[in-house]
Image (cartoon, helix red, strand yellow):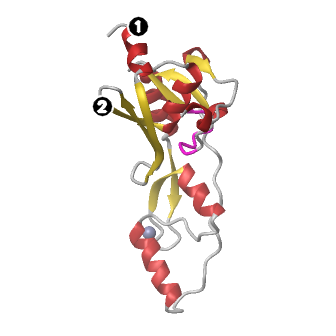
Amino acid sequence: MDKKEKLKHYDSTIKVNGPYYNKKQDRYFVQYVYSDKTKRVITYAKYLMEQFLKRKLSNEETVDHIDRNRKNDVIDNLQVIDKSTHSKLDAKRAKLIEITCVLCGNKAFKEANNLRGNSKQGKAGPFCSKSCAGKYGVEIQNNRMKELDTQPTVESEYYYIDKSAVVVKSENTVDLKSTA
Ligand SMILES: [Zn+2]
């Protein structure tokens, strides 16, 4: 499929459904319906970028959330990068933090994001496992244990993005209603 054909395909969109929240993937999606009744499901982020660029993204292009929050689907937070770079970035960013379980003392590795989230929510911890977190909950419920302090927050693990990989950086915002 050459570029012209792709654009034609994009232009044959007759309907856009969504955005829909997908709980399992924890992000938003939309569905394109084309004039020949074929459908294409893409992330809402990708949809916004395609509307912004007024073209369909290629298979090598993927939309990256600059702030790492996959639900923050606003055009200012989105950039197009190539897929191989994206997976490399995500792999790097997935670096885990070693914690010591406040209940059993075991060491475990956790995502910094999750640790920060739990701390922000005022949760006790960190725990090595769901099992330990569950045990703690039961102890508290039955008044067998004093409530522990909110778990400390951890330093943000931020990795440098290779700027040369950035193809497009958005500059304006797009109103969904005016483009859908
Ligand atoms: Zn534990």
Which quadrant of the figure contains the N terminus? Answer: top left
Residue 84 position by quadrant: top left
Magenta part, dominant SS: loop
Disc 2 C-beta below 8 A from ligand 1: no
Query: Residue 119 location, x and y as percent?
Result: 63, 62
Residue pictured at 47% horizontal, 27% vertical? 86
Q: Secondary structure at mark 2?
A: loop
Residue 4 position by quadrant: top left
Check residue 80 for magenta coloring. no
User: In this picture, is 164 found above or below 74?
Assistant: above
Please give the residue where the numbered disc 1 appears in the rendered image. Answer: 4
User: In this picture, is 175 found above or below 151?
Assistant: above
Residue 37 badge: 2
Query: Residue 51 location, x and y as percent?
Result: 55, 26
Residue 133 badge: none
Residue pictured at 46% horizontal, 60% vertical? 107
Tell me which segment is drawn in magenta.
65-71
Query: Residue 156 location, x and y as percent?
Result: 64, 45
Disc 1 C-beta below 8 A from ligand 1: no
Residue pictured at 36% horizontal, 28% vertical? 34
Q: Is residue 26 left or right of residue 124?
A: left
